[in-house]
Image: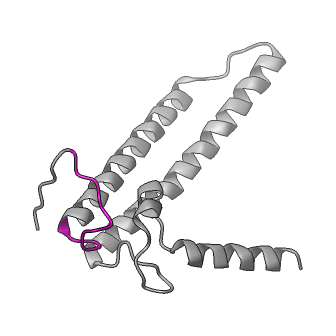
Amino acid sequence: MNVTLPPDYRPAKDEDFMNPKMVEYFRQKLIAWRTELVQESNNTLQQLQEGGIVEADIADRASIETERSLELRTRDRARKLINKIDEALGRIEDGSYGYCEESHEPIGLSRLEARPIATLSIEAQERHERMERTHRDD
């Protein structure tokens, strides 16, 4: 299905949840986010490949190693995020996007706007966090 969005379209609470326009809006949002992450990741990789450590000063070498380690961690986080975006795009394809994995109720629009990869409603997410805290304290 090919849906054209008006440039100023924003999902509204008064329209049918996950109607074709809304689905296309989130699909485009996810794809743009994914593209941005892949581009940042490629830039980081390029910087890591270009930068051989030739600093004679031990402090400079340590500083460069710390920066590299941070860049690699950032890249790993981006990779995990890209996987979650791909999963969200898969949910768009199978029609389950925007619905809580536990309650199957709609995830709030403001939550999806802020975190388009969300799989749980705020209530379900809070339950999970409470359970994690409870089990962590054991």
Judge left or right: residue 134 versus residue 122.
right
> Does the magenta-highlighted stretch encompass residue 25?
no
123 or 131, nearer to the observer = 123
Q: Position of residue 87 (x, y in %)?
A: 40, 68
- Say whether residue 116 is visible: no
Residue located at (76% from left, 22% from top): 61
Please tell me in which quadrant of the rendered image residue 64 appears.
top right
Secondary structure predominantly adopted by residues drawn in magenta: loop
Q: Position of residue 55 (x, y in %)?
A: 72, 15
124 or 58, nearer to the observer = 124
103 or 78, nearer to the observer = 103
Q: Residue furthest top?
A: 56
> Does the magenta-highlighted stretch encompass residue 10?
yes
Judge left or right: residue 37 versus residue 66.
left
> Which region of the structure is painted magenta?
8-20
Residue 136 lies, with reference to residue 80, above or below; the image says: below
Q: How is the image coloured?
A: one colour
Residue located at (39% from left, 38% from top): 39
Q: Position of residue 88 (x, y in %)?
A: 38, 67
Residue 17 lies, with reference to residue 84, above or below; the image says: below
Q: Quadrant of the C terminus?
A: bottom right
117 or 10, nearer to the observer = 10
Residue located at (61% from left, 37% from top): 71
Q: Quadrant of the N terminus?
A: bottom left
- Say whether residue 27 is visible: yes
Judge left or right: residue 86 versus residue 93.
right
Q: Residue furthest right?
A: 138
Q: Position of residue 26 (x, y in %)?
A: 31, 59
